[in-house]
Amino acid sequence: MSTSVPQGHTWTRPVKKEEEEEDPLDQLISRSGCAASHFAVQECMAQHQDWRQCQPQVQAFKDCMNAQQARRQEELQRRKEQASAHH
């Protein structure tokens, strides 16, 4: 009877694969071009264990993300204007 039971735990393989995939937040930060400043925040936090001591790094990351968001908004607006010009 035990020969009809499938061998192994096939369900564990997809779970492991998902764990190996990059975190969506990390993907977003990488695409933003702000990964270096994000890494600096992480390094500072690991070293000091106190976000108050990492304010220069936090501000640099915030400034980078704000600049990236502004560039993205400009790009979306430009695409919207181009699309409406073609209609």
Image (cartoon, helix red, strand yellow):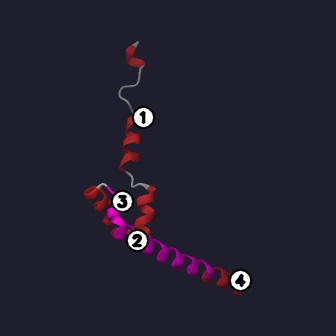
Q: Earlier in the sequence, mark 2 or mark 1?
A: 1
Residue 59 numbered tag: 2
Give the percent coordinates (x, y) of residue 66.
49, 74
- Give the vertical position of 21 relative to 67 (above or below): above
Mark 1 or 3, closer to the camera:
3
Give the percent coordinates (x, y) of residue 76.
60, 77
- Region in magenta: 50-77
Tell me the kind of residue under disc 1: Trp
On whether residue 63 falls in the magenta region, the answer is yes
Residue at mark 2 to residue at mark 4: CA–CA distance: 37 Å
Q: Mark 1 points at which residue?
A: 11
Label 1 residue SS: loop
Label 1 crowd bin: few (<14), some (14–19), many (20+), radius 10 Å = few
Q: Is residue 41 left or right of residue 25?
A: left
Label 4 crowd bin: few (<14), some (14–19), many (20+), radius 10 Å = few
Mark 3 or 4, closer to the camera:
3
Residue at mark 2 to residue at mark 1: CA–CA distance: 43 Å
Question: Dividing the picture into quarters, in which one does residue 87 lie?
Answer: bottom right
Q: Mark 3 points at which residue?
A: 51
Question: Dividing the picture into quarters, in which one does residue 15 lie?
Answer: top left
Residue 84 numbered tag: 4
Residue located at (51% from left, 79% from top): 71
